[in-house]
Image: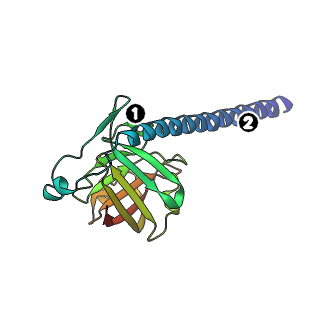
């Protein structure tokens, strides 16, 4: 009986150690990702034009969003969420490897008022977007220096596999990330209230 309890104790300690290792590794990955995003954001801001013209994308909203290449990756601009103290560069296209570098454009365009952004649930990425309240603002600056101001109008949780629901509705901007259990997506719907 004592031998059985020792085995269970040993297994319990092993699982506890594994859990602590995984938690530590996740924190390390999150911190590393935050540093990479911060460096890319600084580089991106240095390349933005000072006096942008709105004419081109207003006349032609179907145009491709311009990009800037930073450290071998293409970015479309950056997003700021003042109420959460978040400011991050946004990569042009979605991929698993790009998700470690910051939010990705899942699909759509700022100029067509239908952009969807995805990011990991890291604390300094989109992990806290569920805390946003109605009328909180989100600011997106494209690589040409155009500033788009949005406000939160709805929060919802969408099942992991329900990609069509992510596209439904008439939203100017959508932000989403996985929930803690990775079974659903925390989704924030926004409308544009200003262009600068």
Q: Earlier in the sequence, mark 2 or mark 1?
A: 2
Residue found at the very far left of the displayed protein: 59
- The spot of residue 126 in percent (x, y) is 48, 51
- The spot of residue 141 in percent (x, y) is 35, 52
- What residue do we see at 44% from left, 54% from top? 80
Q: Quadrant of residue 156?
A: bottom left
In the image, is 167 to the left or to the right of 127? Answer: left
Counting the numbered discs, the total is 2
**SS label for mark 2:** helix
User: Quick check: can you spot residue 77?
Assistant: yes
Which residue lies under the disc numbered 1? 97
In the image, is 68 to the left or to the right of 15? Answer: left
**SS label for mark 1:** helix
Q: Quadrant of residue 104?
A: top left
Q: How is the image coloured?
A: rainbow
Instruction: Please name whichever residue, 64 or 178, is drawn nearer the observer in this view of the structure.
Output: 64
- The spot of residue 61 in percent (x, y) is 17, 56
- What residue do we see at 25% from left, 60% from top? 113
User: Quick check: can you spot residue 161?
Assistant: no
Which residue lies under the disc numbered 2? 12
| Mark 2 or 1: the one toward you | 1
Q: CA distance from mark 2 to mark 1?
A: 34 Å
- What residue do we see at 35% from left, 58% from top? 174
Find out whether the residues at labels 2 and 1 contact each other: C-beta distance under 8 Å: no
Instruction: Please name whichever residue, 35 or 22, is drawn nearer the observer in this view of the structure.
Output: 35
């Amino acid at each position: 009986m004592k031998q059985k309890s020792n085995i269970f104790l040993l297994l319990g300690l092993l699982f506890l150690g594994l859990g602590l290792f995984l938690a530590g590794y996740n924190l390390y990955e999150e911190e590393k990702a935050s540093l990479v995003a911060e460096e890319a954001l600084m580089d991106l801001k240095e390349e933005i034009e000072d006096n942008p013209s709105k004419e081109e994308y207003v006349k032609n909203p179907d145009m491709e969003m311009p990009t800037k290449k930073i450290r071998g990756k293409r970015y479309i601009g950056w997003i700021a969420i003042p109420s959460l103290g978040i400011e991050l560069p946004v990569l042009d296209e979605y991929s698993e490897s790009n998700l470690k570098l910051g939010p990705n454009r899942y699909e759509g365009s700022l100029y067509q008022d239908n952009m969807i952004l995805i990011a990991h649930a890291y604390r300094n990425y989109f992990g806290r977007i569920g805390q946003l309240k109605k009328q909180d603002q989100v600011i997106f600056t494209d690589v040409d220096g155009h500033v788009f101001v949005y406000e939160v109008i709805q929060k919802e949780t969408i099942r992991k596999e329900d990609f069509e629901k992510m596209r439904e509705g008439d939203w100017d901007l959508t932000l989403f990330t996985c929930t803690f259990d990775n079974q659903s997506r925390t989704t924030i719907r926004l409308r544009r209230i200003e262009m600068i």
